[in-house]
Amino acid sequence: MTLSVVQPRHANDGPGAALKARYGFDTPAISEVWSDTLGGLLQHRSVRAYLPDALAPGTLEAIIAAAQSAATSSNQQFWSVVAVEDPDRKARLAELAGGQAHIRQAPLFLIWLADLNRANAIAERAGQGHEALDYIESLVVSVVDAALAAQNAVVALESLGLGSVYIGAIRNRPEAVAEELGLPPLVLPVFGLCVGRVDPARPAEVKPRLPQAAVLHREIYSTEQHAPVAAYDETLRDFQRSQALPPTGWTQAVVSRVSKVAALNGRERLREALQGFGFRLR
Ligand SMILES: Cc1cc2nc3c(=O)[nH]c(=O)nc-3n(C[C@H](O)[C@H](O)[C@H](O)COP(=O)(O)O)c2cc1C
């Protein structure tokens, strides 16, 4: 196994090309507002094909430093992460996440955790109660904290020229994932993140997003703004054709995802799993 040399991805193409890739032709006017960070963010793409190379020493620690630099509600830091590099454990987690091959392939698989166990233990050691942890609010805080931390890690690893993909499918079988990782009570695996060097033979491309008019409301929310979706369907179909994917568009993906409980792939049991993990959900 070779060691990956971290190569920063340069984001100096300027706004025009980056916005076109992100939106198709319906690009927002951003005038001269631009930075290398914006360039990097607009180049994000999920990577599902990796080289087997180990990451350069210090990479994990660097991206966790970025994760810990994210804002966290009241500085409570209600999150943790498990770094998995063991091939057998990655293979077992891949099976628990619907057999996704990229989990096996990536040299590093991070599982981001909403973690109320640490706060619970600290309160117990202090001889105090911890009734606030029983409330859904505390769970929401911990999930938000975990997500913000993870996304900072993604931005950091992409700036180093690495690729990643989130794995929500680890919530298909949360109890089995918790057992595999030895999670204590009050800890929820929120999502996984494959991290590695992008296989240059199977690079990923920037996937276009909805026009800004669909998501950006000014002063008050307007459901009228849901309308421009037809044009986006066409933009996404063009992207799918360019990737040799079935040109199904976006509307159909949303409908398939929301019309049947079966599309949740086991995640409809999340309340039961959370209760089993000790979350009171009050
Ligand atoms: C919370 C979350 C969970 C995800 N779970 C999976 C997953 O299990 N498998 C997968 O291949 N992609 C997964 N993705 C990646 C999305 O499919 C991807 O971000 C989306 O299609 C947009 O593509 P892009 O990231 O390339 O822009 C997930 C993304 C997020 C944010």
Image (tube, rainbow, N blue to C red):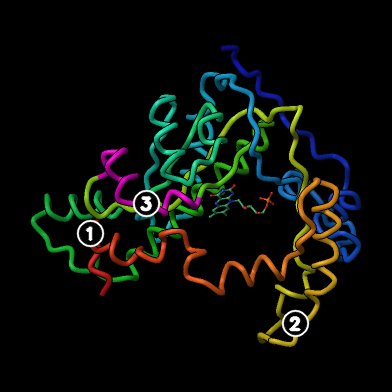
SS for dot 1 = helix
Instruction: Please state the horizontal and vertical placement of residue 282, each as a whole percent of the image.
Output: 25, 75
Prevailing secondary structure of the magenta residues: helix
Residue corresponding to mark 3 = 173
Q: Identify which amino acid the numbered label 3 is placed on.
A: Arg
Q: Identify which amino acid the numbered label 1 is placed on.
A: Gly
Residue corresponding to mark 2 = 225
The span from disc 2 to disc 3 (Cα, nearest Å) is 36 Å
- Looking at the image, which is closer to me, 150 or 166? 166
Question: Looking at the image, how many numbered discs can be counted on the residues?
Answer: 3
Is residue 156 visible in the rendered image? The answer is: yes
Residue corresponding to mark 1 = 276
In the picture, measured across the screen, residue 212 lies left or right of residue 50, that is: right
Q: Quadrant of the N terminus?
A: top right
The residue most toward the top is 2
Chain part drawn in magenta:
168-183
- Which is nearer the N-term, disc 1 or disc 3? 3
- Looking at the image, which is closer to me, 270 or 98? 98
Q: In the rendered view, tell whether residue 139 sits above or below residue 44.
A: below
Residue 111 is labelled as: none
Disc 2 under 8 Å from ligand 1? The reply is no
